[in-house]
Image: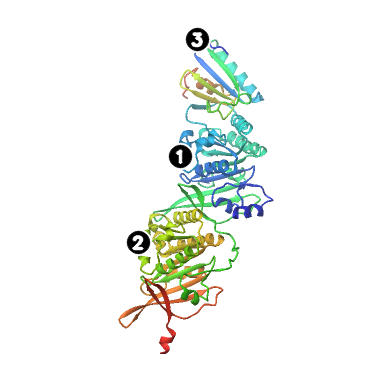
């Protein structure tokens, strides 16, 4: 995935095989990204089954895990992203809603 | 070797030897092969240590590759810490016999947004199984993982799945977990997820730190049921020896001289049985150290090795003092036949002593051992503890066919104290020394109180010691005269 300059969000999605959960997570994530960050994000998908030699890189243990490299700080969002609210908080798309 | 014996006894149930001294004995061969073992205990009890030792010894002693997954300590910290315990972890990592993977749960803020699985972790482990042929795995710790996640229900389910998956791969796993309030682990995992549960307990009693290990359960296998003292020191993790569960020592044949011809006669003719235990008791100044030195030097003069634990005199003092009774230890020390280990008992705790002593015995491989005196241990433990420690020492030495002499100080009253009475029931031969006031001088007296399996004399003799050596003079005639 090429990353044009000026991207606000640089994201990496880790999965372990294209399981139903992974598929669901990807669909949920793409929907959220397109709705809230269209044109200003890059999303790389890394399958741990295919390229497991990550060593101590991102230290992924749960899947799916979305790692937000930009904007800082580094943040990990774990799950199938069915909880849209939490994903948005995690991506800093909108401020934490205080109830 | 005992480990081979235990392994063959439980051949029906495949086990993985940990290589940790003592632990393989009480588990009767090691941890269950291809299954998971839970190590639980409070903070600082040595869970991580036990886990790492399992891998390090597996790599070093059995050539099996191990993977350590740390959710807690930093990788470099772990490697540095454990390199102090004799294992060169860097070298093992280089040889691909060990891998330490740290999963830092605090590095990035974790947000949970929906259901997840532990397939990420499984993918890593699977990769290492394929490339490094990992046979042993440690996950340290359950608590670090569980406290980082909110959805513990999912995690619990996933962790059980992980354990089942490991089982299918034939990997022997050790999982560490903090002890809970009402259950062995905070997350109650021991109830269903582990085939073997080992509890580590670190307590402070009268300002003395005590560590105890207990096997709570071991599916499909018998195991030692007691609490066993364990130690963490420069040599790593060890469970205290190795009290044989049965009295199945082979009775050694042959004799060991007491070093004094007359005393040999008093005992029945030839001295002590080889591989037996001898107690030399008496008040201060009755000649206990002299007698044990005679026994020690006699062994060395026969060309055997003797290890002398001296808790009151230094090597120099003992060597010098024994010259006065005609025993020259210097050449024996020089030849490497005699080894004197002198230290103060209160320098260490009882268990550490026991461990250091057994380690010294293993290293020197003597046929004769002297502990002079055992009564000094009372300063570092209760009577019951000293007794239990002595039982362990006696067992340890007997199982190796080593002949051992202990000296015990009797208080001035001449009445045998508690330790002495207790010890005397454990030993095979008991020789008592006494000082009697005769006219204006004091006379040394010696007699054999008991000697199992020997026709010993009941006579009380006078013991004479000079630079020409020892001699016993019968007092019977004198009394008649």
Of circles 2 and 3, the one toward us is 2
- Disc 3: host chain: A
Where is residue B224 shown, x and y percent of the image? Answer: 58, 55
Which residue occupies 36% across, 59% down? B316
Where, quadrant-wise, is the N terminus of chain B in this rendering?
bottom right
Name above or below for residue A17 compared with residue B319.
above
The dot on residue B81 is 1
Task: Give residue B120's quadrant in the image.
Answer: top right
Residue A21 occupies quadrant: top right
Residue B395 in the image: state x and y as whole percent.
54, 61
* Percent coordinates x, y for residue B422 in the rendering: 47, 68
Please name the residue shown 45% across and 63% down the image. B370
**Marks 1 & 3, CB-CB < 8 Å contact:** no
Q: Residues within 10 Å of mark 3 (few under 14, many from 20)?
A: few
Q: Which residue is mark 2?
A: B317
Of residues B266 and B335, the one nearer the viewer is B335
Q: Left of A48 or right of it: where is B388?
A: left
| Residue in the foreground of this view, choosing between B458 and B419 | B458
Whether labels 2 and 3 belong to a single chain: the reply is no
In the picture of the structure, the residue carrying the numbered disc 3 is A5
Q: Disc 1 versus disc 3: distance between alpha carbons?
A: 45 Å
> What residue do we see at 68% from left, 51% from top?
B11
Residues indicated by labels 1 and 2 sit on the same polypeptide chain = yes
* Residue B215 on image: x %, y %: 57, 51
Q: Are marks 1 and 2 in contact (CB under 8 Å)?
A: no
């Amino acid at each position: 995935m090429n990353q044009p300059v000026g991207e606000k969000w640089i994201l990496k999605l880790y999965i372990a095989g294209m399981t139903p959960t992974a598929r669901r997570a990807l669909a949920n994530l793409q929907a959220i990204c397109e709705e809230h960050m269209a044109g200003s994000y890059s999303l790389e998908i890394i399958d741990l089954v295919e390229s497991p030699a990550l060593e101590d890189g991102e230290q992924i243990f749960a899947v799916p895990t979305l790692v937000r490299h930009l904007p800082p700080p580094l943040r990990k969002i774990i799950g199938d992203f069915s909880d849209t609210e939490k994903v948005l908080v995690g991506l800093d798309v909108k401020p934490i809603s205080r109830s | 070797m005992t480990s081979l014996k235990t392994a063959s006894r439980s051949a029906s149930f495949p086990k993985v030897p940990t290589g940790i001294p003592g632990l393989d004995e009480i588990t009767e061969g090691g941890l269950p092969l291809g299954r998971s073992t839970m190590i639980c205990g409070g903070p600082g009890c040595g869970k991580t240590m036990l886990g790492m030792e399992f891998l390090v010894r597996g790599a070093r002693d059995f050539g099996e590759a191990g993977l350590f997954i740390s959710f807690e300590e930093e990788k470099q910290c772990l490697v540095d810490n454990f390199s102090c315990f004799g294992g060169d972890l860097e070298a093992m990592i280089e040889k691909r016999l060990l891998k330490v993977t740290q999963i830092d749960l605090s590095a990035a803020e974790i947000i949970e947004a929906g259901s997840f699985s532990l397939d990420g972790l499984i993918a890593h482990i699977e990769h290492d199984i394929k490339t490094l042929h990992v046979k042993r795995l440690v996950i340290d710790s359950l608590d670090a993982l569980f406290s980082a996640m909110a959805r513990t229900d999912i995690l619990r389910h996933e962790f059980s799945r992980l354990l089942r998956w490991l089982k299918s791969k034939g990997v022997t796993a050790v999982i560490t977990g903090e002890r809970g309030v009402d259950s062995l682990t905070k997350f109650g995992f021991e109830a269903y997820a582990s085939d073997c549960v080992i509890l580590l307990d670190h307590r402070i009693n009268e300002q003395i730190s005590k560590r105890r290990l207990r096997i709570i359960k071991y599916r499909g296998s018998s195991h030692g049921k007691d609490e066993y003292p364990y130690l963490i020191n420069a040599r790593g993790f060890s469970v205290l020896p190795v009290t044989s569960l049965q009295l199945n020592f082979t009775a050694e044949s042959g004799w060991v001289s007491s070093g004094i011809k007359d005393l040999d006669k008093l005992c029945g003719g030839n001295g002590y049985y080889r591989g037996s235990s001898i107690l030399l008791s008496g008040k201060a100044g009755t000649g206990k150290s002299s007698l044990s030195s005679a026994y020690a030097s006699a062994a060395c003069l026969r060309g055997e090795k003797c290890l002398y634990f001296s808790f009151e005199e230094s090597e120099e003092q003992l060597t010098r003092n024994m010259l006065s009774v005609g025993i020259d230890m210097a050449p024996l020390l020089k030849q490497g036949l005699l080894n004197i280990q002198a230290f103060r008992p209160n320098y260490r705790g009882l268990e550490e002593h026991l461990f250091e002593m057994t380690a010294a015995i293993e290293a020197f491989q003597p046929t004769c051992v002297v502990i002079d005196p055992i009564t000094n241990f009372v300063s570092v433990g209760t009577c019951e503890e000293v007794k239990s420690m002595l039982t362990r020492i006696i067992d340890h030495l007997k199982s190796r066919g080593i002949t051992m002499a202990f000296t015990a100080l009797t208080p001035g009253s001449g009445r045998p104290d508690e330790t002495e009475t207790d010890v005397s029931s454990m030993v095979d031969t008991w020789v008592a020394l006494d000082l009697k006031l005769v006219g204006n001088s004091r006379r040394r007296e010696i007699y054999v109180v008991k000697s199992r399996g020997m026709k010993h004399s009941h006579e009380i003799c006078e013991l004479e010691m000079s630079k020409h050596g020892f001699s016993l003079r019968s007092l019977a005639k004198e009394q008649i005269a």
